[in-house]
Image (cartoon, rainbow, N blue to C red):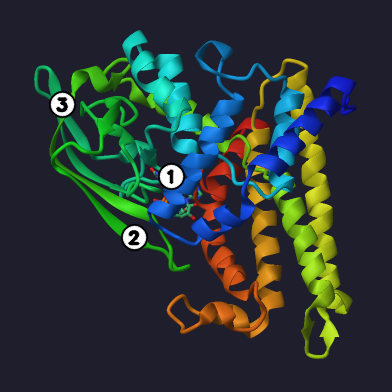
Amino acid sequence: MDIKFSADDLAFRDEVREFFATEYDADAAQQASGDSGEAYKASVIAWQKKLHAKGWIAPGWPVEYGGTDWTPTQKFIYETERGLAGIPDVIPFGLKMVAPVIYTFGNEEQKARFLPRILESEDWWCQGYSEPGAGSDLASLNTTADYAGDHYIVNGRKIWTTYAQYADWIFCLVRTSKGMRKQEGISFLLIDMKTPGITVKPIVTIDGNHSLNEVLFEDVAVPTENLIGEQDKGWTYAKALLAHERTGMAEVADSTRMLEKLKQRASVEVNGGKAMIDDPIFQTRLSDIEMELMALEYTELRVFASMAAGGMPGPESSLLKIKGTEITQAIQELQLQLAAYYGGALPDDLDSQQLGHDFAFEARGKYMYGRAATIYGGSNEVQRNVIAKAVLGL
Ligand SMILES: Cc1cc2nc3c(=O)[nH]c(=O)nc-3n(C[C@H](O)[C@H](O)[C@H](O)COP(=O)(O)OP(=O)(O)OC[C@H]3O[C@@H](n4cnc5c(N)ncnc54)[C@H](O)[C@@H]3O)c2cc1C
């Protein structure tokens, strides 16, 4: 593998660093991030609009639709610098999930109608895949869309729908036919969230935040022009989207930054009379994570090197997802350990933000919400099945 950066790559890296350092308002974003309401949405949109103005909002898209034409190495550099700078990724549902489906399988009207508004962050999208009885086994979904001339009538219930409370549009998998293999008879519909008959119910997670929702559909009329591709062929498009969802879940640079922060805190925090960094058990756990992260970084570089040489990521993306999320969770666990019992403060505790170490409240929230990383984007058990099938031929 050749991982040497060219002079052009290094110049690009400097440009990215400079842009992030001068344009991203970390304090404002930090303030808004604790909010589950409009302030958070506004802060995300403001940053995404800056990225769009720079031409960097959609590195993965083909140039003809507004992509950057970066090489795999440039994409790697961009992601690394973003993670090291502590800048959250763009909200994926529009830019990284539904957009690739629209430009790959949609018709010309759909492309012209939706893609520019996604690039400009004018429409906020959410993903309506999961249902109470259909998660890992997604093809068991029961939300129906009955064909009624120039529209479909949609009835059913989606769950775990991230940021549905902000969304202008939802892309949904719906059942349009029955009686065949369960993967057949599924269609891919784009639904305006303002359509009568849609109800969004909040689900507050254990960290006290509201990002998840149930979305209920009662006789919701959706124009047939909002169908992507062919009726009953949605499973093909849904699978393509899932491949996009999993790429980039290794988050090596984000973990590197978190680990660095952890070490700094462990050097100054005193629990039981000494700095945690001097505690042999803490040191051992820290070293284990560092080694795992280094191994993951090299694995990711190997994947990038093969993509730079024209290859496509295969089951490696499952491996990157498993190890990346496990490492993130291990770091979050150590953060919580560092916060000691102050990490037990609940969101409703009076002045909880002022209890103990100033990072304790955040450590608790990150640890709690972090449990989800091994579930979403295809659970890690399911990723292991993918590897077993593709690599071991089981
Ligand atoms: C924070 C968060 C955000 C989410 N956001 C969205 C969203 O925006 N839109 C959306 O559509 N969905 C979303 N999801 C849902 C997510 O995709 C599902 O939770 C996930 O697919 C797992 O499905 P499930 O929860 O029904 O669990 P199940 O599929 O019931 O799995 C339960 C357990 O069984 C294991 N398991 C299941 N099948 C197998 C198998 N074949 N082999 C081995 N083990 C197996 C799983 O790994 C898991 O441990 C989100 C989930 C979370 C946690």
Q: Are marks 2 and 1 in contact (CB under 8 Å)?
A: no
Identity of the residue drawn at 18% across and 30% down = 145
Mark 2 packing: few (<14 Cα in 10 Å), some, or many (20+)? some
Identify the mark at residue 203; answer none if there is no mark: 2
Q: Measured from the top left, where is residue 4 in percent x and y?
A: 90, 27
Identity of the residue drawn at 31% across and 31% down = 182
Horizontal relation, residue 266 to residue 60: left or right: right
Identify the mark at residue 152; answer none if there is no mark: 3
- Nearer to me, 123 or 375: 123
The three-letter amino acid code for the residue at tag 2 is Ile
- Nearer to me, 259 or 376: 259
The three-letter amino acid code for the residue at tag 1 is Ser
- Measured in 3D between alpha carbons, the distance from the residue under mark 3 to the one under mark 2, in whole angstroms, is 28 Å
Residue 201 sits in quarter? bottom left
Q: Is residue 239 visible to us here?
A: no
Mark 1 packing: few (<14 Cα in 10 Å), some, or many (20+)? some
Whether the residue under disc 1 has CB within 8 Å of ligand 1: yes
Horizontal relation, residue 69 to residue 80: left or right: left
Name the residue that disc number 1 marks.
Answer: 136
How many marks the image carries: the answer is 3
Q: Measured from the top left, where is residue 100 in percent x and y?
A: 48, 23
Q: Measured from the top left, where is residue 323 in percent x and y?
A: 69, 49
Q: Which quadrant of the figure contains the N terminus?
A: top right
Nearer-N-terminus badge (3/2): 3
Q: Are marks 3 and 1 in contact (CB under 8 Å)?
A: no
The three-letter amino acid code for the residue at tag 3 is Tyr
- Nearer to me, 244 or 186: 244
- Measured in 3D between alpha carbons, the distance from the residue under mark 3 to the one under mark 1, in whole angstroms, is 26 Å
